[in-house]
Amino acid sequence: MFEDSNARWIRRRSRSWKTPTIPPRPIELWRLRGATNDVRGLAIETSFGYALGVELDTELVLLFLQPSVERLVAYADRLEAALIGHGWRPIDEDRAGRESA
């Protein structure tokens, strides 16, 4: 009898667990080229709201949680302007594709 009630509890508990979900893909807001690496600004949807991710040479190095898309975009614009002011250059996607072809 003890095993039956324990088994029922485990089955009931396992049904209430959420199945893992696939996280949404980040949206690239901008991409800049430095002397040796590229940096990307990414918009990422989280359970909190949104996050601005900063990726340096394919490695996520910073994640700034933001409560709204508007604040995320404003923060991303200020960060992009600051990086350009420090010598990073915007990468034009069309030109980048032609250069590698």
Image: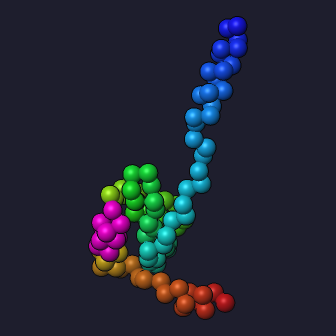
Left of 43 or right of it: where is 73? left
In the depicted structure, whether residue 14 falls above or below residue 3 = below
Q: Which residues are magenta?
A: 68-79
**Quarter of the C terminus within the rendering:** bottom right
Q: Is residue 25 visible?
A: yes
Q: Is residue 92 magenta?
A: no
Q: Position of residue 54 (x, y in %)?
A: 43, 64
**Residue 20 shown left or right of residue 47 in the figure:** right
Front-most of residues 42 and 47: 47
Q: Residue at x 61, y 43 (%)?
A: 19
Whether residue 34 can be seen here: no
Quarter the N terminus occupies: top right
Residue 77 figure quarter? bottom left
Q: Position of residue 16 (x, y in %)?
A: 57, 34
Which residue: 45% across, 67% down? 42
- The prevailing secondary structure element of the residues shown in magenta is helix
Residue 66 location, quadrant: bottom left
**For residue 29, what is the image quadrant?**
bottom left
Compared with 53, 32 (above or below) is below
In front here: 21 or 60?
A: 21
Residue displayed at 48% across by 59% down: 60
Residue drawn at point x = 66 percent, y = 21 percent: 8
Look at the image and name its color scheme. Answer: rainbow
Q: How many marks?
A: 0
Tell me: residue 101, above or below residue 50: below
| Residue 64 coordinates in the image, percent (x, y) | 36, 58
